[in-house]
Image (cartoon, rainbow, N blue to C red):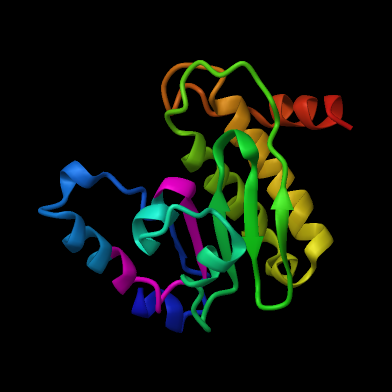
Amino acid sequence: MKVAKEAGALLSYDPNLRLPLWPSAEEAREQILKIWDEADVIKVSDVELEFLTGSNKIDDETALTLWRPNFKLLLVTLGENGCKYYTKAFHGTVDAFHVETIDTTGAGDSFIGALLCKIVDDQSVLEDEQKLREILRFANACGAITTTKKGAIPALPTPSEVHKLLNASK
């Protein structure tokens, strides 16, 4: 991480919490939060937000307790309710796409992969709310499509599938 940061890389972190893989919940929380001061982009699910904050509230005030000065973007994914985004200058919510869900495996990975794929092309989107909202809409579409099939990798959408869903919902 240090070498990547020194080279100007954008560091993203998605804790992808799996408590059975940790010796204890306390150890998981401590180790996950150790990364916080290194990352530029953090993505947590609503369940991870609850776990990390100890609060059952999924609101701006709770999410912002995770904010660090080094962040460029904090995301909270809300499953079928879309996502919340926070930057130094603005915050908001982007609605989800309603699809017939078969399996949610890989939806968060699809979401963050799509987002990072777009951000890597133009990091200025992190300072332009309209552009960021468009990219988050794209990422939400990727996550939604992933839930319509079984498995993580086989369910990842093609660009044409994403554009079809985006165009159908205009």
**Horizontal relation, residue 114 to residue 4: left or right:** right
Quadrant of the snapshot with the C terminus: top right
- Tell me where the magenta segment starts and ends, as one range: 32-47
The picture places residue 123, in percent across and down from the top left corner, at: 68, 68
Q: Is residue 60 above or below residue 36?
A: above
Which residue lies most toward the right here?
Answer: 170
Task: Count numbered badges in the picture.
Answer: 0
The quarter of the picture where residue 81 lies is: top right
The picture places residue 13, in percent across and down from the top left corner, at: 43, 61
Which residue lies most toward the left here?
Answer: 23
**Horizontal relation, residue 117 to residue 169: left or right:** left
Q: Residue at x 22, y 58 (%)?
A: 28
The picture places residue 156, in percent across and down from the top left corner, at: 53, 28
The picture places residue 19, in percent across and down from the top left corner, at: 22, 46
Q: Is residue 69 above or below residue 123?
A: below
Is residue 44 magenta-colored?
yes
Q: Is residue 154 above or below residue 69?
A: above
Q: Residue at x 60, y 45 (%)?
A: 114
Q: Residue at x 33, y 69 (%)?
A: 33
Instruction: Decide which of 136, 153 is in the foreground and name it.
Output: 136
Instruction: Decide which of 33, 61 is in the foreground and name it.
Output: 61
Quadrant of the snapshot with the N terminus: bottom left
